[in-house]
Image (cartoon, helix red, strand yellow):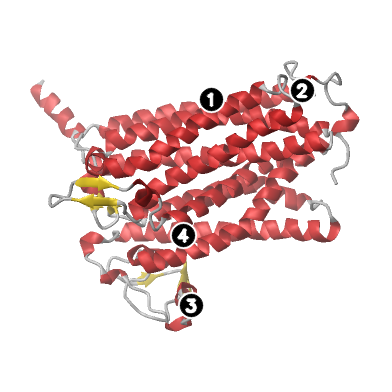
Amino acid sequence: MSAALSDLVAIAAVNPVPWARSQMAFTLGFHIILVPLGVSWSFMTLVANYRGVRHNDQAALLLAQRWSKYMAVTFAVGAVTGTVLSFEFGLLWPRFMGQWGEAFGVPFAFEGIFFFTEGIFVAIYIFGWRRLSPWAHFWTGVPITLAGIFGSISVVAANAWMNAPSGFTLDSEGNVTKVDPWGVIFNDAMPLQAAHMLVAAYLVGGFMIASVYAVALLRGRNDRYHRLGFLIPFTVAAIMTPVQMGVGDALARWVYNEQPMKFAAIELVPETSSDVPETLLGKLNSDGTVSGGLPIPGLASWLSDPSTGKSTVIQGLDSFPEDARPSTSEVNIVHLAWDVMVGLGTLLFLLSAWYGAVWLFRRRMPQSRWFLRVAACSGVVAVVAMEAGWVVTEVGRQPWIVYNLMKVEDAATANTGVWITFIAIILLYTALAITTILVLRSMSRRFRRGGGFVDDDVPYGSSGGAPTEAELDGAVP
């Protein structure tokens, strides 16, 4: 009996660090899918609401009303997954929070304010459909958008602080003795990293929502309601795509200057040199050589600093101590994630250019079914690109949790039973994902059966009732 118990204890006594990393990565990867909807959906709802009120467009009002209800569901689910992440900082990384919590927690204090503000106004906006005048109701939606924007910036500021820690004073033993809140929030990495994530939220959220309506259009639901449902979010995403490429380029140059170790992993540069090729795919071998892939001569150097072109020197991984840089497998993960992010982002840019060119010259969206097929896939593509971007950010910083100040292994919990919570989290989140999808699909079916405004939610007490078929099927300019 005692031997069996000893075997069970041995099985349970695993290294907690990889399990803690895996659980954090899984929960963050799940939560980040909901963030673009929480940040951008309210803005697109306001666009539809404005169009409905300003032009007496019943289809746009119907769209705004339904979107507000979908938005409430995803906001609630995001609140749950975000809360889990907050608890995980203390449960999985107690030594990190013990040493750096006074500084790291500052942006989250602001995020909490914005979160509660957003929740309050989501409720006011939804219940205001029958209780407020049109423009008063519209303006209650504006704080939702602003709170989503500033809440996202606050969270990203915390992550940016881990990449560029500042705004604190340490004593001789390494303990934080003084914190400058503004120095923590407005760290060197924050402006570009926050802009990158904020633009990504509108880009990914737009493509995600538009992809649903692209499927509907492919299935023959070619009425005004569904065309508006596609046009509004897709236009937002298409505008943000080239903006994101510019912000991403600026952020990559910041990494080149401020985090050369991460940049070496991104570009797969084992040794310091100039005239460095841009290697598409490929991998780093354990002996420090690069194999496979498609090298484009000199392009990585040129992109790093166009002013010096191919003569730009890029620090290699060999410039850093072996225990202070990513492992070979982590380098390959970062490089692959970078290629996936940039490759898929380029495809989305080409799709946006297709849409923009047709709109510019013909003043209508592309009519090709191939365009709609690609647009129907754009939501998934955008999510994968966003996830890949976070892999670059987080894995590229390894082995540091606080860049150059604290390693991941020194920050993690010593609890060897973390693997149990990881399995429990996977089961819980699987159930949550299935439930969320079923609820949203059920709402969609009920809305379609209802035809117009449901549950007696006639906007602003209008006596006109639900929009007519002609109103819903009018031409979109």
- Disc 1 is placed on an element classified as helix
Q: The N terminus appears in which quarter of the rendering?
A: top left
In the rendered structure, the answer to whether residue 88 lies left or right of residue 216 reads left
Mark in the foreground, 4 or 3: 3
Per the model, the C-alpha gap separating discs 4 and 1 is 32 Å
What's under tag 3, amino acid-wise? Answer: Trp
What's under tag 1, amino acid-wise? Answer: Thr
Per the model, the C-alpha gap separating discs 4 and 3 is 17 Å
Q: Is residue 3 above or below residue 356?
A: above
Tag 3 near tag 2, CB within 8 Å: no
Q: Earlier in the sequence, mark 1 or mark 3?
A: 3
- Disc 3 is placed on an element classified as helix
Q: Nearer the viewer, residue 223 or 112?
A: 112
The percent position of residue 120, horizontal first and vertical second, equals 55, 26
The residue where tag 3 is placed is 302
Which image quadrant for residue 145? top right
Per the model, the C-alpha gap separating discs 1 and 2 is 32 Å
Q: Is residue 211 above or below residue 469?
A: below
Q: Nearer the viewer, residue 372 or 187?
A: 187
The residue where tag 1 is placed is 435
What's under tag 4, amino acid-wise? Answer: Trp
In the rendered structure, the answer to whether residue 251 lies left or right of residue 415 reads right
In the rendering, which numbered label is found on residue 460? 2
- Disc 4 is placed on an element classified as helix
In the rendering, which numbered label is found on residue 338? 4
